[in-house]
Image: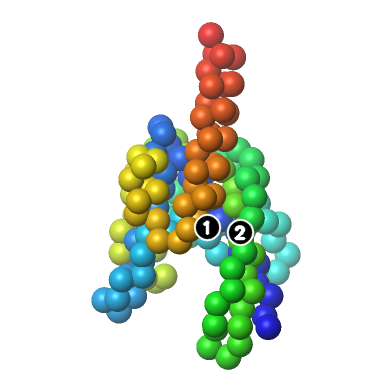
Amino acid sequence: MIEAVSCGGVVIHKGKVLLLYKNQNGRYMGWVMPKGTVESGETFKVTALREVKEETDVDAEIIKYIGKTQYTFRGSNDIVNKTVHWYLMTSDSFYCKPQAEEFFADAGYYKQHEAFYLLKFHDEKQMMRRAYAEYNEYRNKNFKYRL
């Protein structure tokens, strides 16, 4: 069994969640949140920010760590046990551009209920819900300080 570690971001701007649509060689792969493999010498935070930038061209800022998901799948030569560390992030615009080299055909920001419906994987849906609750708490706390 191979152990793999990735990091990703639940990026929210003005209450909307950033999603990517993956379509590999004309085959529907589903809507996902940006994430990717930790490279040698990187911290989890650096990986998460780099992957968001590479996959969506979004300059995001980390608000906080929100948890991890784990799943297993069959790779080309072995079974892979993957752990993904997730961060709540914000961006300062709706601009995004999907990374074609990774077979992302579309990217965009969606309302929470739309994002929940679109996301392909149950664990990502749950992480998005957790991040959204943290985002609302963060937003309310910061709103009070601006008054």
Indicate the amino acid at tag 2: Thr
Q: How is the image coloured?
A: rainbow
Horizontal and vertical percent position of residue 33 = 46, 56
* Residue denoted by label 2: 69
2 relative to 102, above or below: below
Query: Which one is nearer the viewer's eye here, 120 or 98?
Result: 120
| Viewport quadrant of the N terminus | bottom right
Horizontal and vertical percent position of residue 8 = 56, 56
Q: Which mark is residue 46?
A: none
Q: Is residue 34 left or right of residue 20?
A: right
* Residue denoted by label 1: 123
Q: Is residue 82 left or right of residue 114?
A: right
The 10 Å Cα crowd at callout 1, few under 14, some 14 to 19, many 20 or more, is some
User: What residue is rendered at 31% in x and 64% in y?
Assistant: 105
The 10 Å Cα crowd at callout 2, few under 14, some 14 to 19, many 20 or more, is some
Q: Residue furthest top?
A: 147
Question: Would you say residue 95 is visible in this rendering?
Answer: no
Indicate the amino acid at tag 1: Asp
The secondary structure type at the circle numbered 1 is: helix
Which of the 4 image quarters holds residue 130? Answer: top right
62 relative to 85, above or below: above
CA gap, disc 2 and disc 1:
6 Å
Horizontal and vertical percent position of residue 9 = 54, 51
Q: Residue furthest left?
A: 26
User: What residue is rendered at 50% in x and 38% in y?
Assistant: 132
Which of the 4 image quarters holds residue 70? Answer: bottom right
Is the C-beta separation of discs 2 and 1 under 8 Å? yes
